[in-house]
Amino acid sequence: MLAYVFWHRPLDGVDAEAYERAEVGFHESLKATPPAGFRGSAVFRVAELPWLAPTSFTAAAGSGGYEDWYLLEDFTALGVLNEAAVGSGHRGVHDEVAHRYGGGAGGLYGLIEGHAPRLEADALAIWVARPPAGLPGAERRGVAALLGDGMDPDRASLWRRQLVLGPAPEYCLLAPEPSAGVAPRRLPDGWSATSLKREALWNG
């Protein structure tokens, strides 16, 4: 299973409630008429997005925004979703969001441990970033096995980045609480883990 994760903020001056209503409307449209290979989505309000850089349209880097999760069967489903999002049946609600959109970044992740997440129950996302190339610990081999240590596979899921689409961290652990594998003392030199609490606005 894959997850396309999209972090974003509205234009300066856009009413937050209007932006959220437009967001939810788009996700409801996808649920009502799901593209092939689409397995659900969710929208979260996040107080901090440290890797989302500022633009001329958005707040300073590190401030909050929104996080969308789109669960997909495979890479083919990703292409189908890309076309369907602006296709017949979804274009109107997509444009409602796009007209208010200020900036964002995305990441594509593959499920490597645990079960497909119950997005409404995953209040905590732990993002694990590797150090820049050439620094100690930059090699990622073996890190995935370490991060899954202590996680309950029935209540948590571990994801690894599949494509470099932007500043997205290397791994994500969705869990009710941090596990031993993401404790700072357990991570290789140079790696970091950032725990972000999220408020679910919609899931389906």
Image (cartoon, rainbow, N blue to C red):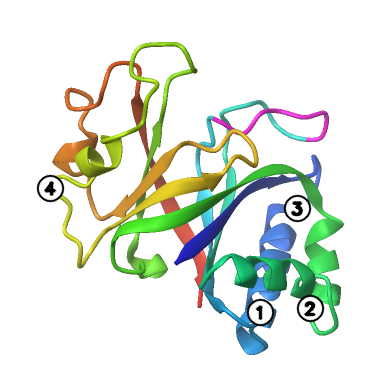
How many angstroms separate mark 2 from mark 4 (CA)? 41 Å
Q: Which of pointers 2 and 4 indicates the residue nearer the eye?
A: 4
Decide which of tag 4 and tag 3 comes sooner along the chain. Answer: 3
- The numbered mark at residue 166 is none
Residue 24 in the image, given as x and y percentages of width and height: 64, 70
Residue 62 in the image, given as x and y percentages of width and height: 56, 28
Per the image, label 2 sits on a secondary structure element best described as loop
Q: Which residue is mark 2?
A: 90
Q: Which residue is mark 4?
A: 150
Decide which of tag 2 and tag 4 comes sooner along the chain. Answer: 2
Label 3 crowd bin: few (<14), some (14–19), many (20+), radius 10 Å: few
- The numbered mark at residue 15 is 3
Indicate left or right for 62 with 128 as reference: right
Decide which of tag 1 and tag 3 comes sooner along the chain. Answer: 3
Tags 4 and 3 touching, CB below 8 Å: no
Q: Residue shown at 65%/42% (left/top)?
A: 165
Residues drawn in magenta = 51-57
Q: Residue shown at 12%/48% (left/top)?
A: 150
Q: Which residue is mark 1?
A: 30
How many angstroms separate mark 3 from mark 2 (CA)? 22 Å
Q: Is residue 56 magenta?
A: yes
Tags 1 and 2 touching, CB below 8 Å: yes
